[in-house]
Amino acid sequence: MRDGKRTWIGSDTQAEAGGTRLSVEQKWVRFGTWALGIAGDRRVQCICEAHAKRLFDDLPGAFDFTERFYDLLKEYDFDLSPSPGDSCPVTGQNLILANPSELWTVLGCLAPIPVELWADGSGRNFGLGAMHAMRGIDDAERVLKAGLAAAFEYDAGTGGEIWTDVLES
């Protein structure tokens, strides 16, 4: 969630593997002033954490990130074949890319779309709804936490603890 010259990020701390709930510290990869939120394949988060410097060092912007991310997944033999009738690669990941002044949702076809607020993962609809309802409130941290609280309350796949952080210049 954007807040002037800052961007608030957050998530739950629960992951799932084969129907088993797992506790994770966070679902974000941080490097310098950049952060990447990952909903989807837990292996992708591990790869991004291991290669954070390569993904984010001297990163000019979101499109450059998507090129680096695509190349990294190819090295790890991810099937990035386009869907039938489409020319766009499909990663199967839901990503949120952020720095202190910008926020993007990165679609599975690696198209970065600038947004003011966003949520992803299984609780996305609940989180987005709650944050949208509070858009007029001038407290981004409070709005973000309300979105997370709604996801915790109504989505069975959201759990653990609420984790938040702020990206500042």
Image: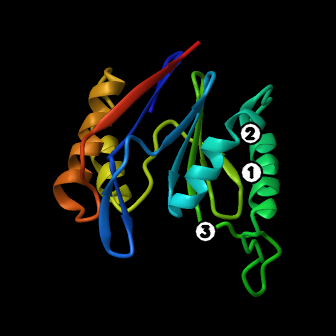
Query: With 22 as the anchor, is 91 left or right in this view?
Result: right
Residue marked by disc 2? 55
Q: Mark 2 falls on what kind of element? A: helix
Disc 1 residue type? Answer: Phe
Residue 69, horizontal then vertical, whole percent: 74, 51
Separation of residues labelled 3 and 1 (CA atoms): 13 Å
Q: Are marks 3 and 1 in contact (CB under 8 Å)?
A: no
Residue that appears at 65% across and 43% down: 50
The quadrant of the rendering that contains the C terminus is top right
The answer to which of marks 3 and 2 sits earlier in the sequence is 2
Residue that appears at 42% across and 58% down: 121
Residue 27, horizontal then vertical, whole percent: 45, 45
Q: Residue furthest left?
A: 153
The numbered mark at residue 92 is 3
Q: Mark 1 falls on what kind of element? A: helix
Q: Residue furthest front?
A: 50
Disc 3 residue type? Answer: Gly
The numbered mark at residue 87 is none
Between 76 and 7, the one nearer to me in the picture: 76
Disc 2 residue type? Answer: Leu
Q: Which quadrant would residue 96 be assigned to in this image?
A: top right
Q: Mark 3 falls on what kind of element? A: loop
Residue 29, horizontal then vertical, whole percent: 55, 38
The numbered mark at residue 69 is 1
The answer to which of marks 3 and 1 sits earlier in the sequence is 1
In the image, residue 82 above or below residue 15: below
Q: Are marks 2 and 1 in contact (CB under 8 Å)?
A: yes
Colour basis: rainbow
Q: Are marks 3 and 2 in contact (CB under 8 Å)?
A: no
In the image, residue 98 above or below residue 85: above
Query: With 151 as the anchor, is 102 left or right in this view?
Result: right
The answer to which of marks 2 and 1 sits earlier in the sequence is 2
